[in-house]
Amino acid sequence: MAKIIIDEQSYEVKDNLTIYEACRQAGIILPALMYDDRLEPVASCDLSVVEVEGEKKLVNACTQRISDGMKIQTQTARVREARKKVLTDLLAKHPLDCEQCSTAVQCKLQAYVQEYEIPHPTQKSSNKNYELDESNPFYIINPNKCLACELCVRVCSELQGVGALEINDKGYVQRKLTVECESCGNCIDICPVRAIIPKRFAEEYAQELAVMGKEQASEQTRHVKTTCSYCGVGCQLELVVLNEKVIDVKPVKVPPNNGLLCVKGKFGHKFINHPTRLKTPLIRKNGKLVEADWDEAYDLITKKVKEIKSKYGSDAFAGLSSARYTNEENYLFQKLVRTVFGTNNVDHCARL
Amino acid sequence: MTNSISDIRETDLMFVIGSNTTENHPVIANFMRQAKKRGAKLIVADPREIDLAKIADIYLQIKPGSNIALINAMMHEIIKNKWYDQEFVAAQTEGFAELAAHIQDFTPEKVAEVCAVSAEDIKKAAQMYAAAEKAGIFYAMGITQHLSGVHATMALSNLAMLCGNLGKEAAGINPLRGQNNVQGASDMGCLPGDYPGYQKVYHPEARKKFEQAWGVSLPAKTGLTLSEIIHGGADGTIKFLYITGENPMMTDPDLKKVRHSLTSLEFLVVQDIFLTETAALADVVLPASSFAEKDGTFTNTERRVQRVRKAIEPIGDSKPDWVIFSELMARLGRPQSYRSPADIMAEIAGLVPEYAGITYERLDEVGIQWPCYSADHPGTPILHQDKIERGKGLFVTVDNISSAELANYDYPFIMTTGRNLYQYHAMSMSGKVDELNKKASESYIEINTATVERLGLKDGDQVKVTSRRGSLITTVKATDRIAEEVMFMPMHFADAKVNYLTNTVTDKMAKIPELKVAAVRVEKV
Ligand code: SF4
Ligand code: SF4
Ligand code: SF4
């Protein structure tokens, strides 16, 4: 353990942490656009600079490690000035069309710009006019917004293990033609701005925006944390809901997935609001399935259960449950089969 | 899984057998790739040169159906060279002498022929596995969907015990469950011989416990398994079938028989979110809710019970499945008093010791891994940590049982089945996502490039694939990632339902059909 002093308060933290991590353990989150605790630390945006006693220059907290007795200042005027400069420079590289930007919540850059009261440049700051890259079926890359922070590049190589992205010599992100992208979308959610966006979200959000305007859309967008319904990994994710529609999915940084998803978890949820979802019970009449109401359906089932039970007994019944259902539903289903039908003929399709 | 997914970060070696992890459990494969980069070793055994095989230290392209031979040969080599964990074996296990005697015959040289890999590679794999301080075994349907599926899992557990890889961090035996809540469906007693928590229906004590809890007398006779239920429909013993959230008309082996069975029933109820192939055969179809429209829990492959939360209202007149079950039970004279799924979980916690400490409040931030015996029990990231659960771990000797179908003159190739990254099971969910369809929408059969040439075919040709049960038309995909006498078809696609070809012979113990091996012939059309 090491003793350090942050903003006049003393703390005891693990040895060999970076200053950034030490502050985080102390409950102080330094600004950083390009930091992620799952990635190897690199000196990047200089937004996380702090003053360290005895050091003439400001110190980058993302890469500098602590030493015992270190005295750190995170909010001095000098530090804030330096951060303002970094943000002003970044802003010059980034188009200021926040009103049209397809983000339901404030992006990180926007949040810092507000916090540090950076004036919006008077003339049109960014004159970049690169073409969008829409070659992937799931996402669009907008080079004009890219800050070249490399987070997406590092996620793709360090965490996804693919390495399908790079920063080109013009200073923005592009897809590598020689590497096959797995369309996991993990580059999307780490981007501190919205330089990579899901196509579907862009479309559906634009539709809603046209109707309700940015402010209302942001207000009404809900994030619901839940569990992916595709495979047994059980990744934790957030469904982004607007107007009773699931318009996007974001990974959550907890076990088991620690902020990663795959193509199915990230992009596979269109089925939820699909027009062919069953909306009413159906009953077979004259060989054809026709719409019915619940009472009719329940009555028919009840009648048949009674008939067949008195004619053939309990063991003429069977139930197949689902490996997609919740635990509560599986529990209730086997209870139904065992207590109402009166048989142990119940199984699920896990064997397949 | 005996261990946790996050353990992969710390492991020294991963032995992946019968699991195409990258396509079926993609995020776990990410952690494996990260481990590999960090310096962990990787051994892969699979008939197809799957993605992980490309970064493996040792890749064994074994023949389908030769898993047990390979594992036994590795143990042969480990015992012969005294590479096993002698301390662990002495303190924690029983039956070592029998095992050692049994695997005498399984020399790498003999087994090399059965598996169609070199004896050298088997020896190297054995040495590498035994040398690792913490080695984890990962397997999936490539192990279990065989006639000898249960035996193969026993062989793997022998191997893990032999090298002391049980009950410690970053090691263990880790089955990767396919569908999202397979673990939970089993935990909750949707099994013909088990009440919730694997309490046996033939056990009078267990039966009494549930009779008291549910206020009803319960049958003592073990019920029928899925395959037996399908048979029962066909032979007239089953009259009424209630299928929920599943599509056996896509996923079961031998679809002709399934159709015959389902259409022979007196009454078929299907509950689903789409009008699936199975629902189309029903007498009554009940519209259910997707996971986005209800509260509840799923239990993942590492036994972690996690929350499902309602995000939107049910679509149209559809209802959450738990509501449908409660309402039906009430109509049928067994009214339930659940106000929400949390009430059902409270009942489960009272009856299943492993879930006793689970409440929705506790699951709010992060899920809990069962067993979780009480409100202050932290859950169990690693099983068997104090000592092996049944006292001492028992080595069970198993032989290599050949698959029910072998290749012969009429059906000269072995066809195996599996999934593809962009689709899921019978596609009733993923098939509704246009972009996923763009990536993978039509069926194909993977055939080795040399075989394609030998048969006078070329990539992209339409071919007729015939097994003893039926035939279908599909497209040739020439590849070098599969051995010359083996072929592969994905299971998802409705345009060529591969399960018209597969075999219904099931493993005697787990009753899992041998979907992984069917003998076929291929002709140009
Ligand atoms: S989608 Fe995944 S694989 Fe593709 S570039 Fe992004 S992070 Fe890399
Ligand atoms: S796309 Fe986003 S994450 Fe990637 S380099 Fe540009 S700003 Fe950074
Ligand atoms: S996101 Fe992918 S890996 Fe994770 S649970 Fe869903 S399907 Fe499985």
Image: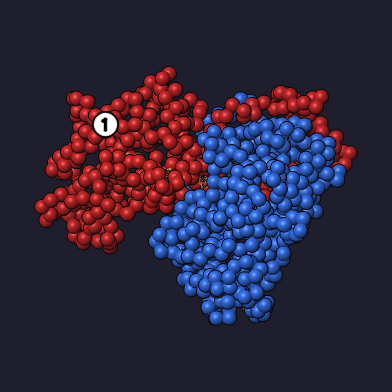
Residue at far front of view: B456
Placement of B439 over or under B160, stated as above or below = above
Is residue B470 in view?
yes
Rendered blue, the chain in question is: B
Placement of A218 over or under B449, stated as above or below = above
Residue at far top of view: A211
Looking at the image, residue B387 sits to the left or right of residue A205; the answer is right
Please, what secondary structure does the residue beneath circle 1 have? loop
Q: Residue A92, image x and y in percent?
A: 21, 33
- Image quarter for residue A32? top left
Residue for point 38% across, 48% down: A155
Residue for point 47% across, 45% down: A182
Q: Residue A239, image x and y in percent?
A: 48, 36
Q: What shade has chain A been given?
A: red
Using a 10 Å C-alpha cutoff, classify the residue at mark 1 as few (fewer than 14 neighbours), some (14 to 19) or many (20 or more). few
Circle 1 is placed at which residue position? A128
Is residue B510 in view?
no
Residue for point 38% across, 42% down: A175
**Residue type highlighted by circle 1:** Lys
> Please, which chain is the residue tagged with disc 1 on?
A
Out of A111 and B345, give the one closest to the viewer. Answer: A111
Colouring mode (rainbow / by chain / secondary structure / one colour): by chain
Q: Residue B172, image x and y in percent?
A: 54, 64
Q: Residue A214, image x and y in percent?
A: 37, 23
